Amino acid sequence: MYDKDNVFAKILSGQIPCKSVYSDDNVLAFYDVSPRARVHVLVIPRGEYTDIFDFTQNAPADVQLAFWCGVRNTVEKLGLRNNFRTIANTGRGAGQSVMHFHVHIMSDDRFSEEF
Ligand code: AMP
């Protein structure tokens, strides 16, 4: 069950600040407070979904499409092109610490043309 007091819900409501990268009606992207890569950004839907399993089961198709468009827009805004990873930890056993669905975008090769 979704916990309305989780830290990302507080970011979405403005109770906690974030360093925003990209924002639209469906998505908010912001820098991770404890980066584990040179570029480490989180993308979250504005709706209340606990994880990717909940999101893909219960979010309407247009909301899911808008989310992935938001991920793409975030990557483009960061200039990462084809040098990034996406990670969606799912469940505490797999390392999910915030129970609001999010995708990590991580890159150590900004603007690289090598690949
Ligand atoms: P996960 O462990 O996959 O649930 O990822 C949650 C991420 O949220 C971690 O990488 C944290 O560093 C990050 N995080 C927690 N609180 C904040 C915050 N207030 N602002 C930005 N990132 C946060």
Image: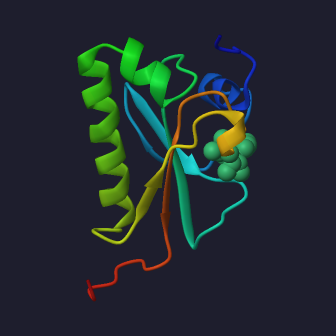
Residue 84 vs residue 99: left or right?
left
Q: Look at 73% across and 25% down and name the residue there.
A: 6
In the image, is residue 16 above or below residue 105? above
- Which one is nearer the viewer's eye here, 53 or 83? 53
Q: Look at 71% across and 39% down and name the residue there.
A: 93
Question: Residue 18, located in which quarter of the rendered image?
Answer: top right
- Which one is nearer the viewer's eye here, 9 or 61? 61
Position of residue 21 measured from the top left corner of the image (x, y, whole percent): 48, 51
Colouring method of the image:
rainbow
Position of residue 95 measured from the top left corner of the image (x, y, whole percent): 69, 45
Question: Residue 68, located in which quarter of the rendered image?
Answer: top left
User: Which of the four quarters of the rendered structure image does ligand 1 lie in?
Assistant: top right
In the image, is residue 21 above or below residue 13? below
Position of residue 52 measured from the top left corner of the image (x, y, whole percent): 47, 30
Q: Look at 64% across and 53% down and name the residue there.
A: 32
Q: Is residue 8 visible?
A: yes
In the image, is residue 65 above or below residue 80? above
Position of residue 13 measured from the top left corner of the image (x, y, whole percent): 63, 22
Q: Look at 53% across and 54% down and name the residue there.
A: 41
Q: Can residue 17 be seen in this view?
A: no
Q: Which quadrant, please, contains the N terminus? A: top right
Looking at the rendered structure, the number of numbered marks drawn on it comes to 0
Q: Residue furthest front?
A: 93
Residue 7 vs residue 115: left or right?
right
- Which one is nearer the viewer's eye here, 42 or 89? 89
Q: Which quadrant, please, contains the C terminus? A: bottom left
